[in-house]
Amino acid sequence: MRAVPYYSQSHLLQSLTHINNTSSLSLFPNFRPSSLRIPRLSSFSNTRADTHTKTKRNGNNSLPAPDPQQKLLQVVLVSPQIPGNAGCIARTCAASAVALHLVGPLGFKVDDTKLKRAGLDYWPIHGSWAEFQNYFKQQEGDKRLLAFTKRGTAIHSDFSYRKGDYLIFGSETCGLPPDVLLDCKSETFGGGTIRIPMVETYVRCLNLSVSVGIAVYEASRQLNYEQLQVPSTNSGDFEQSLLTEDIFA
């Protein structure tokens, strides 16, 4: 169900008045602005007004970026090309308490307004795979690189996931580059290659955002959704702002 964005009472009155005055049909023949009764915002337990203020990027209202190190799972998009997919994946990651990394080159600009509303400018952006490698090697604790590819050797639901896994996905057009696949197969940090089974009679591949959703929730299921039971200390408002906002309205 689509979340309803917050509008003030004056916005609603103006919109209804405009529709009634300009429409060729009399949609509201007895409509009078004074007859409209809108519940007070204070009657709602979670008002959109609060999250709207908190999601501002400028000034003292900026939200802290989610800390990837606090997440049990991480999603890595290598050279994503379609902004709509990236936006959907950002929402999935926020809803499932999973970290998201973008690895360039990207097929879009993250400063686009709609992508900012999707929260993409909050997640770490690495300029190249080499840059991400350096970041990955500096992270403490157990960690693995898991490549999701249609030629993967393990089926996603048969694979055993662990805390600290990085789920790696390639671009919509080219998939994962050879050097990324090699790293995911290496003995040092690689955990293997994984595929999501499908029939290729009519389609070549699954949509990227769908694939990420399938992988994230299978891994989360195996971990008993533990990441959802431990509230984040510095990204709760950020994630709540995504869940209560229609990203591409």
Image (cartoon, rainbow, N blue to C red):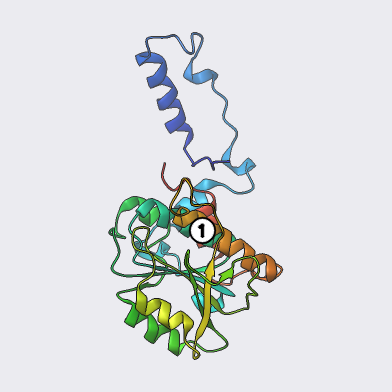
Does 83 sit left or right of 197 as displayed?
left
Does 82 sit left or right of 100 as displayed?
left
Please identify the quadrant where the C terminus is shown.
top left
Inspect this view and state whether residue 225 appears: no
Compared with residue 65, is residue 15 higher up or lower down, i.e. above or below? above
Specify the farthest residue to the right.
224
Which residue does the image show at 31% across and 70% down from the upper left?
Answer: 104
Q: Amino acid at mark 1?
A: Ser
Please identify the quadrant where the N terminus is shown.
top right
Residue toward you, 233 or 160: 160
Q: Which residue is mark 1?
A: 211
Residue 153 figure quarter: bottom right
Mark 1 Cα-neighbour bin, 10 Å: few <14, some 14–19, many ≥20: some
x and y, in percent, of residue 35 in the image: 54, 18
Inspect this view and state whether residue 37 appears: yes
Which residue does the image show at 49% across and 42% down from the upper left?
Answer: 5
Q: Secondary structure at mark 1?
A: helix
Q: How many marks?
A: 1
x and y, in percent, of residue 186 in the image: 47, 86
Residue toward you, 146 or 204: 204
Does 78 sit left or right of 150 as displayed?
left
x and y, in percent, of residue 99 in the image: 51, 70
x and y, in percent, of residue 102 in the image: 38, 68
Which residue does the image show at 36% across and 76% down from the upper left?
Answer: 178
Which residue does the image show at 49% across and 41% down from the upper left?
Answer: 6
